[in-house]
Image: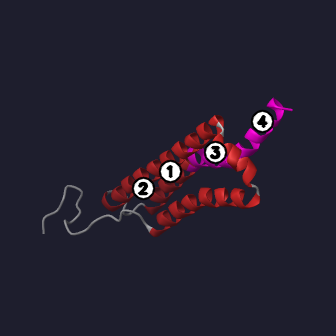
Amino acid sequence: MATLSTNQTLGEHAPLLTSPQLFWLALQATMPAGLILWQVASDAAPLKLFWNDPLGIKLAVGAGTLLVLNFAALLGGWFALNRLARAFLAQQTVLRNVLQGCLCAGCFVLFYLPAVFVLLIGPAVLTINSTLAHP
């Protein structure tokens, strides 16, 4: 059977995403949605201010951009790592796991946590700002 330059047979394909990777993506996707639903259920007035104020809209767009960057970086990194795992890192599971852990931790700290912080604290900040601006 013909082989590729990576010593991989033509019939074998690297998995796009593994089940732990899919679980991590699902967990990260449901957290912001659950956070917004929790805010709506607890007190809708600050959330209405958040979505109607120009600063709140800018904060929401920034948080959305960070979430998109997070998912793009995770998916791109995982696709590359899964491809490399099949070709070059097949016997080096420790190195592969360390690389995946560094990718997850980096994306979580750089992109995900700031976005969740903005969604969690943003309505309170705008409420305090409006209270101080109009006593």
Q: Which residues are magenta?
A: 108-135
Number of marks in picture: 4
Q: Quadrant of the N terminus?
A: bottom left
Instruction: Report the front residue among 111 and 3.
Output: 111
The residue under label 3 is: 51
Task: Give the CA distance from mark 1 to mark 4.
Answer: 39 Å
What whole-number distance in Å separates the C-alpha atoms at marks 3 and 1? 32 Å
Q: Amino acid at mark 1?
A: Leu
Say which element carries label 1.
helix
Q: Earlier in the sequence, mark 3 or mark 4?
A: 3
**Cα gap from disc 3 to disc 4, whole angstroms:** 14 Å
- Say whether disc 2 or disc 1 marks the residue closer to the N-terminus: 2
Foreground tag (3 vs 1): 3
Give left or right: position of 45 versus 69. Answer: right
Q: Earlier in the sequence, mark 1 or mark 4?
A: 1
Q: Confirm whether the magenta stretch covers residue 121.
A: yes
